[in-house]
Amino acid sequence: MTSRDETEALSVAAESSGALERHGSGSGSGEVSTQRHSSGEVSTERHSSGEVSTKRPGAVDTAEEPSPDTRPRTRDLDTSPIAEAATAPDTAAGGGSDDGSDDDGASPGGRKRRPLRTSLIALAAITVAAAAGVAATGTIGGDGGGSGGSAPSGPPATAKVERTTLTDTETVDGNLGYGDATTVQAPASSSGTGDGQSGQGQSGQDQAGQGSSAAGSAGDGIVTWVPEEGKKIERGDTVYRVDQQRIPLLYGSFPLYRTLRSGSEGDDVRMLEKNLRALGYTGFTVDDTYNSATAEAVKEWQDDLNREETGTVAAGDAVVADGARRVADVKTSPGAALSGSILSWTGTERIVGVDLDVQFEDLVEKGTKVTVELPDNTTVQAEVTDIGTPSTSQGDDSADGSGSGSGDSGSGDSDDKATLPVELTVKDQKGLGRYQAAAVQVTLKAESREDVLVVPVSALVAQRGGGYAVEVVTADGTEYRPVKLGMFADSRVEVSGKGIKEGTVVGVPK
């Protein structure tokens, strides 16, 4: 009777690179023949002497006795408990081990155990993934209180609960500059309102005198000098020259609009006398009446200006503004006829303009204090000094072209945002540095909470089932304590709850 070892032949479909055949012999010689086909074909034979020879295509048959170090061993893989635990069934077609024994775990169905290295890698990957999953949950179990919420280890960093005033703010865009420019126009001609509005009769001799007192007052003459851009002009300084006669700056709230002489009365007389007094002229009383004393002071002023001493002041003899001015743009040049626009100017102090979204209108009023951040990250304090009328960009665009009216009929105004022009005054002009014009950030105060407990927002931990807690560091370790949240501001949050007080140490990320 032939034994099972003598008659059994196994043909196992292994990798796609070839096929493996194993034959057993019952003669006691243990002869084994193994063949692997395709490009990696290997032929192994075991002879009765116990020798093993391996043949590769084109290789010389080596039937010598192998050294103990190179002798194949059949039980040096997959024997550790870790490998046994990490083993996963493989349903691919395959066979047993090289020696055909059952000790390596090959099942009658042809399943084989994965190599040890693969098992260890898989086990490590599962362990890392599980740890990452726990760390990424961002939640804690239980109700967040007591020992049940204790953390297994201390937090990576800590912060203390602080008692302070928490202020919620809104930051908007602004522009640093000198404000809107206004234009200085040439005076009206003699046929205008200059003499007619005086309310008094005037002889031809007086008219001739008026004409000689200021060549530019009648709208005639040649411009002979203009200031450069950026020049600061104060009371009494020359704004421009006409036929080499100086046209000075006076301070006031409205322009000269008639010829002033002895007997004139009104607010414009008082404005003129205030300026004469400020420039150092005396001998008259500052009031609403233009008398002989006023006329004498005017003659002294005209003499200092190298003009004819007439004792009368015409509409074009001076330019009036509400204060010192800074030349923004010169619109004429020496040699041009005195007409139209001469120059534009602004105030001399830098201000901040903001086109404020109307949703923040309730955050500003005259006198509101704000913080202005400059491009170099320095800050200065400013105050709201003027609030304009809300407007939209659509209204400005519609005036650009004659065809915009029909185009607007089919378009909605959903993209238009109403803005409120706000002007901010900066008292500390030196704090603005050398910036003449720059984009800035304006911080408006929206809400303040005084004497509240706050922690960094990053200290909050979401609780399972809703709500938040903080990880409190105690003498015995750490524990999670639930907190009630209040106002958020500046990366901090108002908190309250049992066991939360000033100085309490809480965990935060690094």
Image (spheres, rainbow, N blue to C red):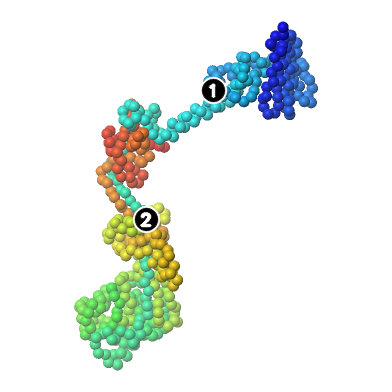
Looking at the rendered structure, which numbered label has been put on residue 330?
Answer: none
The residue shown at (21%, 81%) is: 265
Q: Nearer the viewer, residue 31 or 285?
A: 31
The C terminus appears in which quarter of the rendering?
Answer: top left
Circle 2 SS class: strand
Q: How many marks?
A: 2
Q: Nearer the viewer, residue 4 or 21?
A: 4
Of callouts 2 and 1, the N-terminal one: 1
Question: How many other residues sit within 10 Å of disc 2, few (<14), some (14-19) or many (≥20)?
Answer: some
Image quadrant assignment for residue 59: top right
> Residue 51 in the image: x percent, y percent?
74, 14
In this view, the residue farthest toward the front is: 1
> Residue 409 in the image: x percent, y percent?
41, 67
Name the residue type under label 1. Answer: Ala
Mark 2 vs mark 1, foreground winner is 1
Placement of 224 over or under 481, stated as above or below: below
Q: Nearer the viewer, residue 246 or 17?
A: 17
Circle 1 SS class: helix
Q: Residue tagged by mark 1?
A: 86
- Residue 161 relative to residue 22: left or right: left
Q: Residue tagged by mark 2?
A: 172
Name the residue type under label 2. Answer: Val
Label 2–label 1 contact, CB within 8 A:
no
